[in-house]
Amino acid sequence: MNTQEELIEWLRDAYAMEKAMEIALKKQMDSDDTLQPLRDLFEVHYVETQGHAAAVEGCLKTLGSNTSALKTTFAEAIETMKSISSSFAKDSGVKSMLASYAAEHFEIGCYLALIAGARNLDLPDIARTCEEILADEQRMADWLEANVPQAVTSYLKESATEEGEKKAEAAPTPTRHVAPIDTPIEAGADDDPAEALRQEREQAAAVEDATEKARLQVTQAAMPVMIR
């Protein structure tokens, strides 16, 4: 394989990389977890990425070659699986942003290599095209680097708020115990069986005592008559 063939393979890799990036950006644009400023930037970079892919394909045609369907399909499939696997994660927004930051730096490295390879092969037009793409990738990476801390801070604050609300909802409501209205505060003598029995016995004893006194009075009154 000569050096130009190697450059063609690198360009094919770059094209597959840009097509996979389109999938990643589209997923981030459509995600509810993506902050609005970041979504706006992804929309701009999505259009740029489509232009990058077209520009790289033009470089391949200049060299009498074309894109690799196998590499492109494989790269797109990998990115699709990554998107599906991370979409159910609670922190998918933050992870997507970190993945984008890493991907931008990988693209920067790829285009730096392509620029150096094109210059060595005396292909200034291809080198210039890659330099223009590199500027877009560098601008995107710089923006992400400046905004990742803010995105992480916002996510952590939101998570803390949600956790506090869930704890408040799960906490049991204090119960006040109130006695029913018809419940007596204290039990009286009438409610005490022993006390009732005592009072009954006292009444019976009083009746018996009164009866005995009456009998004695009758006996005393009859005694003078008996003596006569």
Image (tube, rainbow, N blue to C red):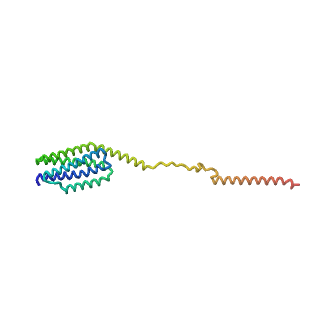
Quarter containing the N terminus: bottom left
Outermost residue, bottom direction?
70
Residue found at x 59% / y 50%: 184
Q: Position of residue 110 (x, y in %)?
A: 18, 49
Residue found at x 51% / y 48%: 176
Outermost residue, right direction?
228
Q: Position of residue 65 (x, y in %)?
A: 14, 54
**135 vs 103, nearest the viewer:** 135
User: How many numbered discs?
Assistant: 0
**Image: 16 above or below 138:** below
**220 vs 139, nearest the viewer:** 139
Say whether residue 174 is left or right of residue 228: left
Outermost residue, top direction?
146
Q: Position of residue 141 (x, y in %)?
A: 23, 45
Say whether residue 88 is left or right of residue 104: right
Q: Position of residue 183 (x, y in %)?
A: 58, 50
